[in-house]
Image (spheres, helix red, strand yellow):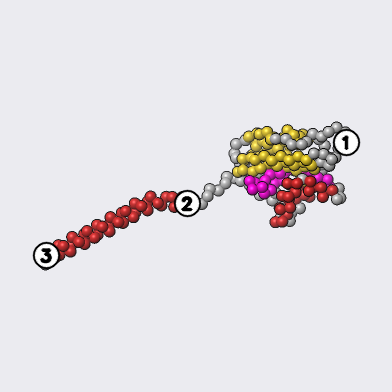
Amino acid sequence: MTHDRTLHTLHTRRTLLARLGRAALTLAVASRVAPPLLAQSAAPARPLPWADGLELAVNFSFRAPGGRYNRPYAAVWIEDERGTPVRTLSLWASSAPGKQKYLAELRRWWRGEQKRRATDSTDLVSTVSSPTRLAGNYTVTWDGRSDRHQPVPQGNYVLCLEMAREDGPYGRVRQPLTIGASPFRIAVDSDGELTDVTAELRRRN
């Protein structure tokens, strides 16, 4: 009888040790697998907000031939990486009756405006447009807000300029920009009568 009890005790201990060993192995495997699983489920980092005190200054020149000429329609605006309009910085357009139909000559800006109007009934043209201009040097600035005056984050954007003049050339410039917290200044390609284009992230005056 004593012999049987001894065998039973040894069998029980072996079973317990086997179970403990399997549990330890399971924990070891789980400890190796858990970090990647946790990393995969972690929420993506939020983009940083627009840095306080910075603005984007866009400088450009409009050169025209001598003599009488039609003043151009022009637009300067910002798009996101997907090509969605973010903010129209400047829009030169005639306010004369029937003349706004020529806004369609600003081909890319006008397509973006049509898309925006599909979801936003705000009359952007009447709020941001200004008279057409003579040839010269111009600067417009972006304060890091959208057309709805909401702050946008740091990140990748596209600077766009477009100019169209009756009986004159059409010009368009697109320049990808990465907006961070450090000032910069870059030269941008010219097109048509649109020249001397630069983009400068700078301290606000």
Which residue type does callout 2 highlight?
Gln
Please name whichever residue, 40 or 138, is drawn nearer the observer in this view of the structure.
40
Taking 52 as reference, is 36 left or right? left
Relative height, residue 2 to residue 96 (above, below): below
Q: Quadrant of the N terminus?
A: bottom left
Q: Is residue 88 magenta?
A: yes
User: In the rendering, which numbered label is found on residue 40?
Assistant: 2
Labels 3 and 1: the sequence-earlier one: 3
Local packing at callout 2 (Cα closer than 10 Å; few below 14, some 14-19, many 20+) is few
- Which residues are drawn in magenta? 77-95
Labels 2 and 3: the sequence-earlier one: 3
Q: Which residue is mark 1?
A: 68
Which residue type does callout 3 highlight?
Thr
Helix, strand or loop for disc 1:
loop
Helix, strand or loop for disc 2:
helix
Q: Which residue is mark 3?
A: 2
